[in-house]
Image: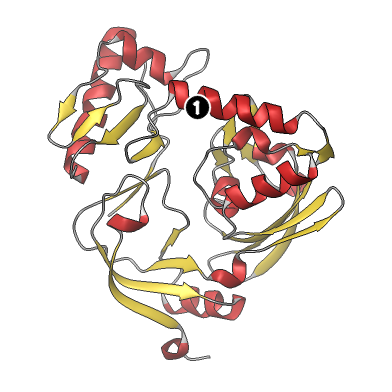
Amino acid sequence: MSIKKIELRQHVDLKGLTTIKIGGPARHFFVAHSRDDLAEISKDTGGAWYLLGRGSNLLVKDSCIEKPVITLGEEFDYLRADNETLEVGAATPFSRVLNHCLKSDLSGVHNLAGIPASCGGLLRMNASSFKREISACVTEVEAMDKSGTISRIAKEALFFGYRASSLKDSIVLRAWFILHRDTRVKNEVRNFLKIRRETQELSLPSCGCIFKNPPGTSAGFLIEQCGLKGLTKNGAQISRKHANFIVNVKNASYEDVDYLTRFIKDSVYKKFGIILEEEIERWG
């Protein structure tokens, strides 16, 4: 297959494709509609690419992104259910999975309610919320490595850690989950969403949490103890609601967010001797 037949867009604005609404244009933006597309793109780019899902947890520089960007087409957005087993395409928004779980009283991943991500992205970073990781319910993952080789991998052969997995350098294609029936799931989701609304800044664009939680404490607590809530740099602000969120108040730039991120790191280190590790992914 020639790469000329693959959907390639030029100078695609990434600002509108990230949850924080920051980012420059991608010089080469590929939409993959099949596994053959993905293999060909990876081969032609030498495995040097960025993979774009729903754009959460991502901070993109305002300058032109020279490294090719790949996103999965609608062919990778699907959900197939067989009783308590789900097969989910990597491009499927988690909100779609959650809706199915609510209709079917399925419990296991509902604690992630409210996270604006694709299922592939959630797996690559082993997303967690309310003390439960998405990897707790996964049984198998099909993924493509940078050479274009596709493997169906059992959970036991994968590494999942705190905000980390062995899938980081792969393209997740689909995954299988085993859930369980629980009539309490609707009430639990209402409670999770209520807590999110009360404790997180959801009305303004953000990446979500900027930093990982250090052992034994939370990054938000440390940042708040440094008195940094509400600190502003041009259009970016450390959230007054959740100190581990940096929000785009008005046309914030990459540099604005980077400044606040570095200021937080310096402040927390000076006060507590703790080096905060970023949770977000940066492009550029």
Residue at 36 percent across and 52 percent down: it is 18
Secondary structure at numbered mark 1: helix
**Quarter occupied by residue 7:** bottom left
Residue at 60 percent across and 36 percent down: it is 112
**Quarter occupied by residue 98:** top right
> Does residue 96 appear in the picture of this structure?
yes
**Residue 249 image position (x, y, % from top left):** 22, 36
Q: Quadrant of the C terminus?
A: bottom left
Number of numbered labels in the structure image: 1
Residue with the mark numbered 1: 196
Depth check, front residue: 170 or 51: 51
Amino acid, disc 1: Arg
**Residue 246 image position (x, y, % from top left):** 30, 32
Extreme residue in the right direction? 83
Looking at the picture, does residue 79 appear above or below residue 272? below
**Residue 33 image position (x, y, % from top left):** 55, 77
Whether residue 24 sits left or right of residue 146 in the image: it is left
Give the colour scheme shown. secondary structure
Whether residue 221 sits left or right of residue 39 in the image: it is left
Residue at 84 percent across and 47 percent down: it is 84
> Does residue 273 appear in the picture of this structure?
no
Whether residue 172 sits left or right of residue 109 in the image: it is left
**Residue 273 image position (x, y, % from top left):** 33, 11
Extreme residue in the left direction? 234
**Quarter occupied by residue 67:** bottom left
The crowd level at tag 1 (other Cα within 10 Å; few <14, some 14-19, many 20+) is some
Looking at the picture, does residue 133 appear above or below residue 266? below
Depth check, front residue: 4 or 169: 4
